[in-house]
Image: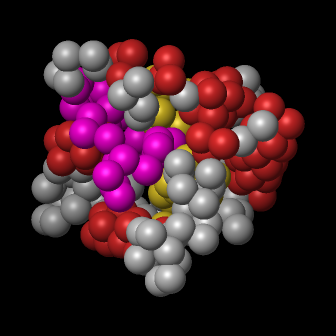
Amino acid sequence: MSERKIVVLFFHPNLKTSKVGSALSETAARIPGVLFRDMYGIYPDYLIDVKREQQIAEAHDLIVFQHPVYWYSCPPLMKLWIDEVLEYGWAYGSGGNKLHGKQMLNAVSAGGSSEAYSSAGSNRFEISTFFTPFNQTAHLCGMKYANPHVLFGARGLSQAEIESECHSYENLLQNYIRTGELP
């Protein structure tokens, strides 16, 4: 069986302030079989090349949206990417089948702890609740949605904890390349 191809679309509006985002990005970028794209670096003006992005998405088996949890959702450029690239007639709707059978994964860093993302926590809901729109987007586009890969407590992690999280992320991506499976 051939190896699967992954594109990691990295959306971070202020990477200079994120040790975790930087470390995870470096990890993804060095894995053979992964196309890593720093979307804020590519589109600082928010003028997305829709046709190019569609070609890239179509050429990969797994689309990873790597981003921080940003106001209980995603950064604005990522939302714009979804709005513009996943257009009717291409990604969904009449004739919109270009992503059918592919997989989607959110790989996210959250400043809050796992306890904060619970019914008793300060954020009142499990973190998976905040990813329901992405799950539905994948469904609408005929894609399989994987459980989000979440790094909790990103602001307070030690260097050793960040390295451990990077190792976990690397294993997840490499396992997908080899097997086509996500946890």
**In this view, 136 is above or below 2:** below
> Does the image show residue 181?
yes
Residue 35 in the image: x percent, y percent? 57, 29
Q: Residue at x 50, y 23 (%)?
A: 17
**Which span is picked out in magenta?**
48-77
Q: Residue at x 36, y 72 (%)?
A: 132
Q: Residue at x 53, y 37 (%)?
A: 8
Residue 131 in the image: x percent, y percent? 40, 66
Residue 156 in the image: x percent, y percent? 66, 42
Which quadrant would the C terminus be assigned to in this image? Answer: bottom right
**In this view, 128 is above or below 113:** below
Give the image quarter of residue 124: bottom left
State the residue in front, 17 or 28. 17
Is 113 placed left or right of 30 in the picture? left
**In this view, 131 is above or below 121:** above
State the residue in front, 119 or 44. 119
State the residue in front, 128 or 172. 128
